[in-house]
Amino acid sequence: MLRVEGLSRRFGGVYAVQDLSFDVELGELRGIIGPNGAGKSTLFHVIAGHLRANAGRVLLRGEAIDRVRPDQRAARGLGIVYQGARIFRGLTVLENIMVGAHSTTRHGFFEAALRFPLCRREENQIRARAEALLDQVGLTGLGDRMAESLPLGQQRAMQLATALAANPAVLLLDEPASGLRSAERRQFARLLRGLCSQGMTLLLVEHDVALVTSLSHKITVLDLGRVIAEGAPTEIRADPRVVAAYLGSVEDEPS
Ligand SMILES: Nc1ncnc2c1ncn2[C@@H]1O[C@H](COP(=O)(O)OP(=O)(O)OP(=O)(O)O)[C@@H](O)[C@H]1O
Ligand SMILES: [Mg+2]
């Protein structure tokens, strides 16, 4: 479904991502872990098209997309939730989700908000889809609430719905559960599992090793821009390079 081949990205003289290669299967949930600065977010930005690679290729369903603009990558089914993504404050939950859908339509959200007649039918379809997504992510009945009034766990579910509104086939999630409490995490994990069982392909960057190992089919471990290990969660947890490069550093962090 998604292939990265020899991908490199430098900032100045320093490689943030260096000669990275991996394949993600249709319907797979791929965990991506690695210490701070390992290159996880840079990798996602290059895949989504917001950063240009210095070398290598990205293939979606076997087609190279390196020359494809970010919005066109989204239209081809590549979605992303950025690390620390903001919500649209001052908009309702439903409106936030609708903004996500407008990234794939001919008319932008604000154009549609001005109610140009041409857009009205599209607008109604998008509203119906956003309402269905509310239910899917467990926010039934909260569509009219202001986005910023929701607790963090529900804001994250809303951000997931916003990304889903664009109908991604492959969704890149960069620390979508950071800051959530354990009950909220478990709920979020259930949502992600549900998406995969419906055939969506997910790439999940996550520092919570317990969460990522419980969710992932396979895990890719990055350190200093390179893949240092890849395999099933049980293999990864036992890999001494991973323990040294990553698990050790996590245990050093204050909890
Ligand atoms: N725009 C930029 N300009 C210069 N250097 C950058 C830029 N973005 C990232 N870097 C550098 O690239 C390296 C990889 O950063 P990146 O944000 O991809 O790491 P990460 O694995 O996502 O880390 P974290 O777990 O903290 O989110 C780091 O050394 C970082 O300082
Ligand atoms: Mg990051």
Image (cartoon, grey):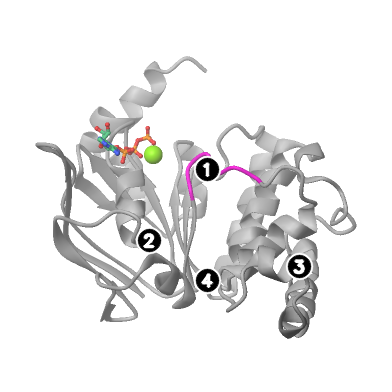
Q: For residue 102, what is the image quadrant?
A: bottom right
Q: Earlier in the sequence, mark 4 or mark 1?
A: 4
Lower sequence index among marks 4 and 3: 3
Residue 48 marker: 2
For the point 37% across and 61% down, which residue is it?
A: 48
Residue type (three-letter) at the residue carrying disc 3: Leu
Magenta stretch containing residue 236, yes or no? Answer: no
Question: Could you tell me how far apart the alpha carbons at marks 4 and 2 are, in whole angstroms?
Answer: 12 Å
Give the mark nearest the N terminus, 1 or 2.
Answer: 2
Q: Measure the alpha-carbon separation of dots 3 and 1.
A: 43 Å
> Cβ–Cβ below 8 Å for labels 4 and 1?
no
Q: Which residues are magenta?
A: 82-87
Q: Position of residue 137 (x, y in %)?
A: 73, 59
| Above or below for 230 versus 79 | above
User: In 3D space, how far apart are the residues under numbered discs 1 and 2 (Cα atoms)?
Assistant: 24 Å
Of pointers 3 and 1, the one earlier in the residue sequence: 3
> What residue sits 80% from the left and 75% below the top?
128
Which one is in front in this view, the residue at disc 3 or the one at disc 2? 3
Q: Are marks 3 and 2 in contact (CB under 8 Å)?
A: no
131 vs 103, nearest the viewer: 103
Q: Amino acid at mark 4?
A: Pro
Mark whose residue sits in front, 1 or 2: 2
Please tell me the numbered disc located at residue 168: 4
